[in-house]
Amino acid sequence: MRVSAIADLSVRELAAAIAQGDCKAVEAAEAYLAAITAREPRIKAFNQVLADRAIEQAEAVDAARAAGKPLGALAGVPLAIKDNLCTPFGRTTCSSKILAEFRPPYMATAVGRIEAAGAVVLGKTNMDEFAMGSSTENSGFGPTFNPWDPSRVPGGSSGGSAAAVSARLAAGALGSDTGGSIRQPAAFCGVVGMKPTYGRVSRYGLVAYGSSLDQIGPITGDVADCALLLGVIAGHDPQDSTCLNEPVPDYLARLDEPLKGLRIGRPREFFSKALDGEIAAAIGRAAEAFQSVGATVVEVSLPHSRIDIDGDGNVSSYAVACYYIVAMSEASSNLARYDGVHYGHRTREAVGDIIELYSKTRAEGFGAEVKRRIMLGTYTLSAGYYDAYYNKALKVRRLIKNDFDQAFASCDVLLCPVAPTTAFRLGEKTADPLTMYLEDIYTISVNLAGLPGLSLPAGLSKAGLPIGMQLIGPVFSEETLLRAGRMFEKAAGVCRLKPPLAS
C-alpha cells in the first residue's frame, strides 16, 4: 500500500487493513515515520519520536497476526500521546525544563490501554508547559505550528497532538483537557477532540495541573475514530479514586443510528459580540444541518457563563474568573512537588540552604506562564484571601453546574462555539495573558461542571482556516454526543479535513 494512501486512512480503516493483511503494521509505522521526517521540521508537533520502539511494536503486531493470535481494536495503528502522560519508555517532560530528563517508572492507564489494544506509539507530543496555555507557545522547547498556516498557533495546550493528527503525522492521539485543551486545538487544526465526563477516563499517570478539572481524551480525524479511541481508554481504574465505576457502552455500536427528535440547545449567552461573525454563521449552518435530519433547535440560557462586553470592548465572564481561581489554586498545590529534591531539575548553582535550593531550582525550571499561575494560585489560597477568592469561586462553580442542569431539562445537547476566533497568529496574544485566557471562554465551563464536550470541524473560514463547533451534554452522554457529531458529519459533509502541509 502506498505511503500517502496509508496516511489518509482513518483509524478504523487502517486497523481493518492490518487485521485483513492488506497492510502490514510495519508498513503503517514506516509510512507515518516517513511523514514525520518530511513534515515535522515545519510543524514541530513532537518532543520525542520513538522510531525504534514503534517499529518493534509494529513487528510484534505482524508476528501475532501471522501466528493467528487475536488482535486488539487498535492493532498496528500509529498513535501519538501528549507529553504529560507518564510512560516507562522515553521521557515525560510536560514541555518543561524542570522535567526535561524525567523518566517515570510507571505507565499512565490510558496509554497502557491503547497499547494493550495493539496501538503503536510514535512519540510524545509538544504542549504548553504543564498544560498551562491556549496556543502551545508556552512550551519550554519552542512552539508548535498550525498545519493550515504555520504563521498561526495550533491551539493549546494539546497543540502538538492536534497538529500531529491534522498533518497526518499520526492516525490519532491522546491529549488532556483542563479548560479546553483538547477541544480548542482540535478546532484550530480541523480535527475532532473529546473531553469526556470527569471520571470517565482514568487520570492515573497524567501529570496533574488542576486535579478537579483534568481529563484525558482522544483527538482524531473523524467522529467514529474518536468513538473507537474513547471506548478503549474509558472505564474504571482502581488506581484513580476519581475514576467512576460506570459501564462503558460500545460507542461504535449505535453511532450511525438516526437521532430524529434530538433537542439541540443554543445558549444565548454564547452568541454575543465576543464571537467572530464567521464562526457564528458556521454554527448557524450547523443548526440547520441538524434540523435537516430531524433535530429541533431551542434557545436555552446559561446565565453564569454569560459573556459581558463593556463600552471599550473589554470582555469578562463569571466562568473565566471562577476557572482561573480554581485552576491556579490547584496548580499551586500540584506544582509544589517540583523542588529539586525528589526528582526533576536541580539547580547547579551553589546554595546556602534548602529555601535557596527550592527558589533557584524553580526559577530555572519553570517558564513565565507557569510561574504566573503558581503565584496567583498561592495568593488565592493564602490566609485572608481564601474566603474572598477561592471559596467564592467554588460557589460560582456550583451555580454554573446548576445552569447546565436546568438547560438539559429542555434539551439533550448544547451547540456552541469552541473559541471566539479561528487560529490566531504566533505572538499575537503572548504579551497580554488576559486576552489569551479569554480564548477559553466557551470551553472552561464544561470542565467546571464536569461535563463531556465534543469539538468537531464546522467548515473553513474565508481565510481557509478551520472553524470548530462544540457539542456539550449531561454527564455520561458521550454516546449521544458522538452520534450527534456523526449526524452532522453526514448531513454537512464536513469530515477529515486535510491541511496544505499534509499534502
Image (cartoon, helix red, strand yellow):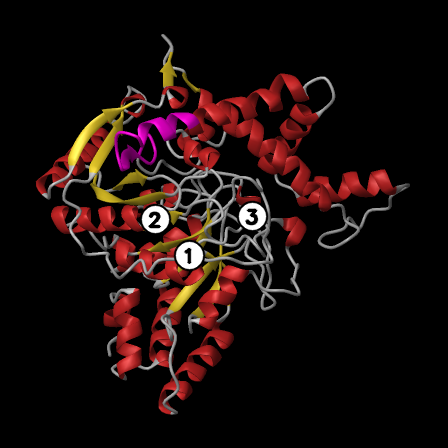
| Range of magenta residues | 402-421
- In the rendered view, does 382 fall on the left or right side of 94? right
Q: Earlier in the sequence, mark 3 or mark 2?
A: 3
Is residue 100 visible in the rendered image? The answer is yes
The image quadrant of residue 282 is top left
Q: Assign a secondary structure to mark 2.
A: helix
Distance from Cα at disc 2 to Cα at disc 1: 12 Å
Q: Assign a secondary structure to mark 1.
A: loop
Asked whether residue 325 is drawn in magenta, I would say: no
Question: Looking at the image, which is closer to me, 351 or 385?
Answer: 385
- Of the two numbered discs 3 and 1 in the rendering, the one whose residue sits closer to the viewer: 1
The quadrant of the image that shows the N terminus is bottom left
Reading the image, the residue beneath label 1 is 247
What amino acid is labelled 1 in the image? Answer: Pro
Distance from Cα at disc 3 to Cα at disc 2: 18 Å
Residue 462 location (% of width, % of height): 18, 37
Question: Looking at the image, which is closer to me, 137 or 253?
Answer: 253
Distance from Cα at disc 3 to Cα at disc 1: 15 Å
- In the rendered view, does 281 fall on the left or right side of 117? left
What amino acid is labelled 2 in the image? Answer: Glu
Task: Examine the rendered structure and indicate whether residue 380 appears above or below residue 444.
Answer: above
Reading the image, the residue beneath label 2 is 478
Within 10 Å of disc 1 (Cα), the crowding (few <14, some 14-19, many 20+) is few
Q: Earlier in the sequence, mark 3 or mark 1?
A: 3
Which residue is painted at 26% across and 29% down in the image?
410
Question: Looking at the image, which is closer to me, 192 or 415?
Answer: 415
